[in-house]
Amino acid sequence: MDSSKSAIVEIQNLFKSYRRGSQQIPVLEDISFDIAAGEFLALMGPSGSGKSTLLNIIAGIDKADRGVIRVAGVDIGSLAEAELANWRAANVGFIFQFYNLMPVLTAFENVELPLLLTGLSRRERHEHVEIALQLVNLADRMDHYPSQLSGGQQQRVAIARAVVTDPTILVADEPTGDLDRASAEEILRLMDSLVHQFGKTIIMVTHDPRAAEKAHVIKHLEKGVLTAS
């Protein structure tokens, strides 16, 4: 990775724990690292290592107990809930393991959903959706419903939905976990092109070493602590 690129995500001394009855269960302990703009980062670790919790904190879904996290210079840990929701809508694209598409909506309508929260006109939304679906090579499937698409095609629709707002970062939680190997490779190539051709920043949680190989940087978590890669 080009070291001259500035950090888009800055994580400093992050701690997170959950309460279970009278017990305080540590999940993340003193996590510090930066993610450069245009970087493809993989977070790896066994189940319960804290990688999904860390991803959720980066995405503004969860908050750390203490420590600082900045995304594009914004201290998201200091934002109130309403401010955080607005920030997420404008800055984060989500790619999930199980696609999270609305079954009663077409591919076009699923991709359009995040744009309904913006001030774009109907014509502008249409243009944005068409571009996003062309990007994932599904312009010819825009009127299809999720049940009419393969798993790989559904994940490509989900990726189009994630990028349609041109977010600051993309967060992907096991994006190939529900796909066969050929479809998984297709999705990883698409994500790689988003980084190399369009300069997107991707943070991906994965347990699959073959998926992690596509990343520029791999961070390993073990019981909430970053280990040497």
Image: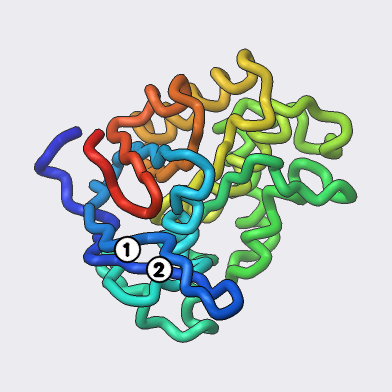
Question: Circle 1 — which element?
Answer: strand
Horizontal side, residue 166 vs residue 109: left or right? left
Query: Badge 1, how many Cα within 10 Å: few under 14, some, many 20+?
Result: many
Residue 71: x and y in percent read 32, 63
| Residue type beneath disc 1 | Val
Where is residue 218 drawn, in percent x and y? 32, 35
Look at 62% across and 32% down and name the residue there: 177
Front-most of residues 20 and 10: 20
Residue situated in front as seen by the camera: 207 or 68:
207
Write down the residue under mark 1: 71
Q: Earlier in the sequence, mark 1 or mark 2?
A: 2
Q: How is the image coloured?
A: rainbow
Q: Nearer the viewer, residue 27 or 97?
A: 27
The reply, left or right, for residue 124 in relation to residue 228 is right
Residue 6 appearing in the image: yes
Which residue: 67% across, 56% down? 123
Residue occupying image coordinates x 47% and y 32%: 191
Which residue type does callout 2 highlight?
Lys
Tag 2's secondary structure? strand
Which residue is the extreme one toward the left? 4
Q: Which residue is mark 2?
A: 16
